Structures are given as structure tokens and as C-alpha cells.
Image (cartoon, rainbow, N blue to C red):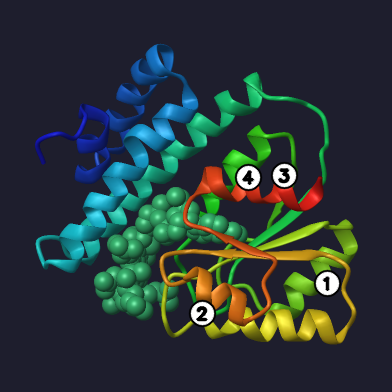
Amino acid sequence: CSGLSELSRRVMEGDRDGALAEALTVMAQEGPMEVISGHLIPALDEVGRRYETGEFFLPQLMEAAEAASAVCRLAEEELLRLGRSANRGTVVLATVEGDLHDLGKNLVGTVLKSHGYRVVDLGKDVKAEVILEAAQREGAQVVGLSALMTSTVPRMREFIEEARRRGAGFKVIVGGAAVSPAYARSIGADGMSYDAVGAARLVERLLS
Ligand code: B1M
């Protein structure tokens, strides 16, 4: 994996402790956002590529995911320490029912928090009903849904249909590897983004 940093390599190898130690060094030099966008995402992209070409198997995927999550939490702590304390609005986030992929959604949550939003993260494999209840209870201005599989993407359409049927006032944004702008438009989403920083910009635009 030439071209990838030492931190990216440690994440790919699933070396959680090594990745955390390396992340501290990188964070001191480059800052927490760069840890995510310059090291974590390239590592996960490469892991995904290797899984797809059959070079990596499920156990390696899970170990890399675990190392990535630990680094993400570390970067999040630092981002929050540096970030604004203002509450610019509430975003409820979830990975849709049937889908266990949460690394991307977690990154979106981290970046939104660092931009001053209150994030209520409902986790992964979350039923539409639970998301709707939480959005109402928390007074969310935005609900963000993530889906990574073609089999789970339809849950987004169902959620939006149900939310509109109930006259819910929040905006809905969607993302994840299985979502395209055309699909987002076709289901009446208020926006989609290919990455976490784009998701924060989208929320800023929707709430301005
Ligand atoms: Co799985 N998996 N996986 N997996 N996995 C995919 C998605 C797959 C494409 C791999 C493949 O086969 N080619 C494939 C889906 C095929 C399809 O439907 N088209 C797949 C499969 C099949 C499966 C299983 C069925 C495998 C099995 O058990 N045989 C199983 C399903 C479990 C389930 O969900 N029910 C499974 C399990 C897993 C692990 C648990 C091992 C692990 C997930 C760990 C975790 O998330 N905690 C895993 C992983 C890691 C992957 C790949 C390799 C990488 C996904 C990832 O984390 N990427 C993935 C292949 C791939 O995507 N290339 C694959 C890094 C992450 C930072 O990117 O999530 O895209 P991403 O998020 C980005 C953007 O998309 C965007 O911002 C993020 C940051 O830039 N974004 C948003 C995401 N959500 C957003 C929301 C927004 C806005 C932007 O607004 C709200």
C-alpha cells in the first residue's frame, strides 16, 4: 500500500493500539480533521477496495473497522475540545434498518458536532419508527440517514414517505456508498453528500 501513511497502514492492519499511538502524533502535527480526511478515509477506502478484490476477508475488515472507530473517537474528542460550543441545531442520525455499516455515519456525526450541531446518534440498524419518534422528541431540524447496501437503501424512501405523510417538519439528508444524487432526488430527500464534510456543509445550507 505505497502512498498510504503509517497511520493509514496501521488502521488497515487492524492494529488498534499502533493506530492510536500514530494518530496522536499525526494529530499534533496536522490536526484532528486531517486525521479523518487525510488518513482514516483513505485507509477505509483501501480496505474496501481490497475486500472487493478478494485480498481482504471479513475478519480483516472487522479489525480494520475497530481500529478506525478507535481513531475516529480520538479525533472526535479533540475536535470537540477545539470546536464551538454553540448549538446551531439538532441533527438525528441513523443507519437504516437492516444495515450494520456505521463507520461513515459516525464520521458524519463527528464532523457535524465539530461544526457546532447537537447530534443525536441512534446507531445502526434503526427502524423508521424509532427515528421518527427520536426526531420529534429531540426537536430535530434535520434527520440524516446512512445506507451502504442496495438491499437497505429502500428504507430511506420508506422513511421519507412516512415522515411526509405525518407532516414532519424536519429536513432529511441521505448518504452512504449506495446512494446517488439521482436516487436522493427521486425519493424527495432534501439533500445528499458523498462525504462527511459535505454533509456538514449541506446541513449549514439547509438551516441558513
Ligand atoms: Co460490508 N459491505 N458487509 N461490512 N462493507 C459493503 C458495503 C459492500 C459494498 C462490500 C462489497 O461486497 N463490495 C457490500 C454491499 C454490497 C451491496 O449491497 N451493494 C457489503 C456487504 C455485502 C456486507 C455483508 C453482507 C458481508 C457479509 O456478511 N457477508 C455484511 C452486512 C451486514 C449488514 O449490514 N447487515 C457486511 C459487514 C461489514 C462489516 C461489519 C465487516 C464492516 C462494517 C463495520 C462498521 O461499519 N462498523 C463492513 C465494511 C467495512 C464494508 C466496506 C468494505 C467499507 C464500508 C466503510 O466503512 N467505508 C464496504 C465496501 C465499500 O464501501 N467500498 C462494504 C468507509 C466509510 C468511511 O465510508 O460508509 O461510504 P462510507 O461513508 C462515507 C460516505 O459514504 C459518506 O460520508 C462517509 C465519510 O466520507 N456518508 C454519508 C455515509 N453516510 C452518510 C450519511 C450522510 C452523508 C454522507 O448524511 C446523513
Considering only vertical position in the picture, is 112 above or below 61? above
Q: CB atoms at circles 1 and 2 under 8 Å apart? A: no
Identified at 35% across, 52% down, the residue is 65
Q: What residue type is labelled 3?
A: Glu
Q: Nearer the viewer, mark 1 or mark 4?
A: 4
* Separation (CA) of disc 3 from disc 4: 6 Å
Q: Earlier in the sequence, mark 1 or mark 3?
A: 1
Q: Which residue corresponds to mark 4?
A: 200
Residue that mark 2 sits on:
153
The mark lying in front, picked from 3 and 2, is: 3
Of residues 134 and 46, the one drawn nearer to the viewer in this rendering: 46
Q: Residues within 10 Å of mark 1 (few under 14, many from 20)?
A: few
Q: Please state, as top left, top right, bottom left or bottom right, where the N terminus lies in the image.
A: top left
Around disc 2, counting alpha carbons within 10 Å, would you say few (fewer than 14), some (14 to 19), or many (20 or more)?
Answer: many
User: What residue is shown at x 64% (from left), y 21% (from top)?
Assistant: 81
Mark found first going from the N terminus, 3 or 2: 2
The first of marks 1 and 2 along the sequence is 1
User: Which of the two labelled residues, at mark 2 and mark 4, occupies the earlier sequence position?
Assistant: 2
As shown in the figure, which amino acid type bears the numbered disc 1?
Answer: Glu
Element carrying mark 4: helix
Of the residues shown, which amino acid type is indicated by label 4? Answer: Ala
| Of pointers 1 and 4, the one earlier in the residue sequence | 1
Q: Which label was assigned to residue 204?
A: 3
Residue 53 horizontal side relative to residue 157, left or right: left
Q: Are marks 3 and 4 in contact (CB under 8 Å)?
A: yes
Q: Are marks 1 and 3 in contact (CB under 8 Å)?
A: no
Horizontal arrangement in the rendering, residue 44 relative to residue 83 (left or right): left
